[in-house]
Image: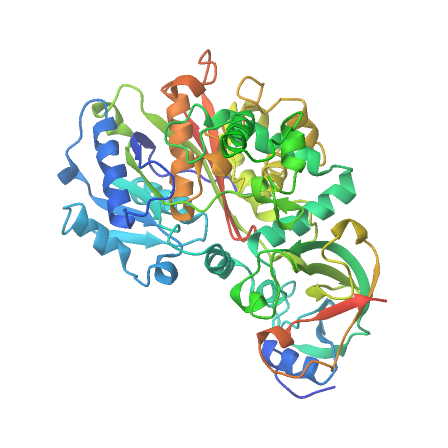
């Protein structure tokens, strides 16, 4: 049984902002963070003076490698006009800003700080696909890298084990992709805002205008099964199973619970926190489940005094389609081996009983890896505050939402439960 | 079997010599490949080398079309994918490895559970790639 933990002082989220996620040839990390920061400042209902910040925690994964520049804490404090405030950069691969969030929560819970900015950012689009594959593989285990594994490769291998054990197939993964695209239609920050049907229509239109052979797919699955439309990356992971190469930044504002209502009448409170580490692929006891997700979830449910059934919706780390299925099982939303059926039955759709990745997920919202953890929490914050516009899930009795982040191939996992009181 | 330090360096050197060696904890008898110098179960460091037969079965695999630059340099690309896999050795430990002698362009032809044998002692250069394990169908 996981130890039951608690915060020394409650913490609330009172502001949030994001840059658009996408591929921006003309913007770098600083530009993206400034954009997210400005939106965050403006999001605070009762106003917020940046000089009141006590400290910043910023997550980033690959800038040392892709941009050849380190020491981003101080660089960004300067860019934001916040000298001499202290800044700490966190790195946990694709969970980097989920770790920044936790560190900020602990800093406030300890009583040391009252008002803390959490940020995450990444710039990836100036690299070739092969360079990105190599850079992200820095978070794999050395033995996996030596065996030629890329990230899509590791999740491809996991998918073959899952298919074999539970009788699922590529077609089930397509259901995840179709849902993510459907949700992202309603997310103005998302990198890919078109449904699969809309993408199909535009391809037909393009072929028609070029006088080329006009493709005729009877439905989304036939499109996704067409190797020309959806080429293989690391079998069985195809292009549409993979989150894209993205640039983007996200910022959010955390404050001590007792001062939260001086920022907004609808603060969102930190109810449960979990973080855990896992083994690399070859050492894992079960190839169809990520132990770190299970451990992080246990810890957060214990702290929150909640069970999976209490979580009304969640953002999960769908870096690859199969990862979403593993996550919804490992978080306890669906029993092992039934996640693919739940998705097929529409249970995780925007209008289903357990909406998953209402933002469009990493697949469609985009996955600037260092920004992802913070951005997931921002989606949960918006849903709980009923400000998610056209992708808003029914507001009736919304109370608990959660976000799961994953670094590497399950080496680092976090699970965070937020609450509207 | 050897007095060399139990670590990845020695593991790679022994692979070059055609030996697939793991480590065994003298307290709990657990076997690890690649070798561990610290038992993760007992947290003690009294480990000894054990020789693996180099046979096992396919647990999970992928056929990679977009590899890292060092695989691309070996001629692997969208038209020439390669297979990487998790393999369970007959002695129990699991390893990650390249699989050769399978049709990576037709992954449907590759069956989980198939018997595999390690290709040892035939790989010349001492770079990362040759230090990795390679299996072929038995």
> Would residue A322 be visible to someone looking at this image?
yes
In this rendering, position of residue A306 left or right of residue A170: left
- Residue A219: name its quadrant: top right
Circle count: 0
Q: Where is the C terminus of chain A found, in terms of image quarters?
A: top left
Residue at image position (62%, 28%) is A220
Q: Position of residue A327 (x, y in %)?
A: 59, 38
Q: Nearer the viewer, residue A262 or A346?
A: A346
Q: Position of residue A326 (x, y in %)?
A: 63, 40
As displayed, is residue A351 above or below residue B40? above
Residue furthest toward the front? A211
In this rendering, position of residue B6 left or right of residue A268: right
The colour scheme of the drawn protein is rainbow
As displayed, is residue A132 above or below residue B70? above
Residue furthest toward the top? A396
Q: Nearer the viewer, residue A14 or A143?
A: A143
Residue at image position (34%, 36%) is A20
As displayed, is residue B116 above or below residue A132? below
Q: Position of residue A186 (x, y in %)?
A: 43, 23
Q: Position of residue A129 (x, y in %)?
A: 48, 54
Q: Where is the N terminus of chain A found, in terms of image quarters?
A: top right
As displayed, is residue A345 above or below residue B61? above
> Would residue A307 be visible to someone looking at this image?
no
In this rendering, position of residue A396 left or right of residue B22: left
- Residue A106: name its quadrant: top left
């Amino acid at each position: 049984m996981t130890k039951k933990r608690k915060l020394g002082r409650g913490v609330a989220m009172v502001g949030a902002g994001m840059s658009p996620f996408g591929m921006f040839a003309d913007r770098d990390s600083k530009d993206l963070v400034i954009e997210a920061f400005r939106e965050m400042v403006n999001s605070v209902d009762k106003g917020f003076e940046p000089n009141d910040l006590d400290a910043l925690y910023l997550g980033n994964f690959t800038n040392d490698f892709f941009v050849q520049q380190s020491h981003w804490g101080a660089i960004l404090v300067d860019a934001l006009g916040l000298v001499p405030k202290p800044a700490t950069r966190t790195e946990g691969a694709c969970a980097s800003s989920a770790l920044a969030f936790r560190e900020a929560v602990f800093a406030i819970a300890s009583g040391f700080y009252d008002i803390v900015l959490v940020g995450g950012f990444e710039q990836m689009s100036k690299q070739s696909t092969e360079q990105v594959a190599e850079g992200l593989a820095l978070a794999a285990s050395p033995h996996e890298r030596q065996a030629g594994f890329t990230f899509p490769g590791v999740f491809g291998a996991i998918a073959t084990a899952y298919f074999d054990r539970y009788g699922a197939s590529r077609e089930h993964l397509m259901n995840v992709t179709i849902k993510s695209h459907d949700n992202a239609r309603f997310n103005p920050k998302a990198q890919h805002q078109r449904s699969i049907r809309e993408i199909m229509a535009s391809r037909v239109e393009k072929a028609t205008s070029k006088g080329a052979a006009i493709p005729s797919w009877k439905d989304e699955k036939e499109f996704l099964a067409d190797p020309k439309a959806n080429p293989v990356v690391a079998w069985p992971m195809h292009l549409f199973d993979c989150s894209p190469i993205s640039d983007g930044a996200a910022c959010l504002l955390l404050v001590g619970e007792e001062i939260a209502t001086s920022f907004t009448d609808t603060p969102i409170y930190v109810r449960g926190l979990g973080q855990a580490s896992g083994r690399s692929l070859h050492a894992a006891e079960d190839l169809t489940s990520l132990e770190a997700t299970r451990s992080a979830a246990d810890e957060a449910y214990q702290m929150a005094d909640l069970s999976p059934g209490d979580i009304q919706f969640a953002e999960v780390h769908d870096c690859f389609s199969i990862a979403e299925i593993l996550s919804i099982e490992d978080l306890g939303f669906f029993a092992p081996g039934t996640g693919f059926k739940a998705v097929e039955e529409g249970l995780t759709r925007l209008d289903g009983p357990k909406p998953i990745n209402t933002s469009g997920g990493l697949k469609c919202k985009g996955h600037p890896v260092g920004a992802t953890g913070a951005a997931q929490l921002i989606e949960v914050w918006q849903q709980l505050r009923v400000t998610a516009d056209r992708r808003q899930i029914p507001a009736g009795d919304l109370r608990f939402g959660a976000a799961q982040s994953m670094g590497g191939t399950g080496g680092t996992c976090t699970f965070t439960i937020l609450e509207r009181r | 079997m050897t007095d060399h330090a139990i670590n990845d360096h020695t593991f790679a050197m022994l692979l070059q010599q055609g030996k697939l060696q793991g480590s065994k904890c003298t307290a709990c008898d657990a076997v690890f490949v690649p070798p561990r110098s610290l038992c993760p179960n007992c947290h003690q460091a009294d480990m000894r080398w054990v020789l693996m037969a180099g046979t096992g079965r396919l647990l999970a695999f992928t056929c990679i079309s977009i590899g890292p630059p060092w695989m691309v340099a070996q001629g692997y690309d969208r038209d020439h994918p390669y297979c990487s896999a998790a393999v369970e050795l007959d002695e129990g430990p699991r390893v990650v490895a390249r699989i050769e002698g399978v049709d990576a362009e037709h992954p449907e032809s590759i069956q989980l559970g198939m018997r595999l044998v390690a290709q040892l002692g035939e790989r010349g250069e001492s770079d990362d790639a040759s230090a990795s394990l390679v299996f072929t169908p038995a």
